[in-house]
Image (cartoon, rainbow, N blue to C red):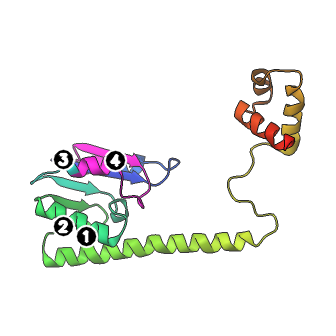
Amino acid sequence: MKYGYARVSTVNQDLESQITALENEGCEKIYSEKFTGTKADRPQFKELLSILKAGDTLVITKLDRFARSTGDAIETIKDLFKRGVRVHVLNMGIVEDTPTGRLIFNIMSSFAEFERDMIVERTQEGKAIAKQRDDFREGRPNKYTKKQLEHALQLLETHSYKEVEETTGISKSTLIRAKKKTNS
């Protein structure tokens, strides 16, 4: 049987293109999840690995969807080969259980890990540069201006949270946080 595995790292990313590619490849069952690849405990991937048996094929779109690191990729692929499972990486081809196939897989895994490490390094460098600015604030930007929150808090003096939320669109939890902030 042909199984597919699709993964994205964050909740905001879209699995659709990977799933479409796996369907076009003829995967009969597709496991997917929105889970960072840096964690070993990926529930859908673990479940998929547990059901694969001799003669099955595991299809993934890219090598970086498969493993956290080169070592992790090599261990996983060794286990799959031992069980008689074929591995097909769409942007690379079928990974053969031969000395050459394993060598190419190891090299490509190393490049995937290197690429991920470079992205992390560039992100950290960008963050370090941004932190040098006086107006730097960690996290996402505020949704509401100070003026909007002040107005909403004034409304709270004569209206319920629900009424203020309906009028301003500012959630009760945001109002409570803003209220605590002004009281401290």
The residue closer to the viewer here, 158 or 102, is 158
Give amino acid for label 1.
Ile
**Between marks 1 and 4, how big is the CA–CA gap?**
20 Å
Give the mark nearest the N terminus, 3 or 2: 3
**Which residue has dot 4 on it?**
43
Taking the spot 50% from the left edge, 75% from the top edge, the residue there is 118
Q: Is residue 175 magenta?
A: no
Residue extending farthest to the front is 184
Q: Are marks 3 and 2 in contact (CB under 8 Å)?
A: no
**Between marks 3 and 4, how big is the CA–CA gap?**
13 Å
Give, as a single range, the part of the protein colored magenta: 21-49
Give the mark nearest the N terminus, 2 or 4: 4
Dot 1 crowding, Cα within 10 Å, few <14, some 14–19, many 20+: some
**Which residue has dot 3 on it?**
51
Q: Quadrant of residue 62?
A: bottom left
**Between marks 1 and 2, how big is the CA–CA gap?**
6 Å
Taking the spot 39% from the left edge, 47% from the top edge, the residue there is 33
Give the mark nearest the N terminus, 3 or 4: 4
Q: Which numbered marker is on residue 26? A: none
Give amino acid for label 2.
Lys
Q: Secondary structure at mark 4?
A: helix
**Between marks 2 and 4, how big is the CA–CA gap?**
20 Å
**Which residue has dot 2 on it?**
78
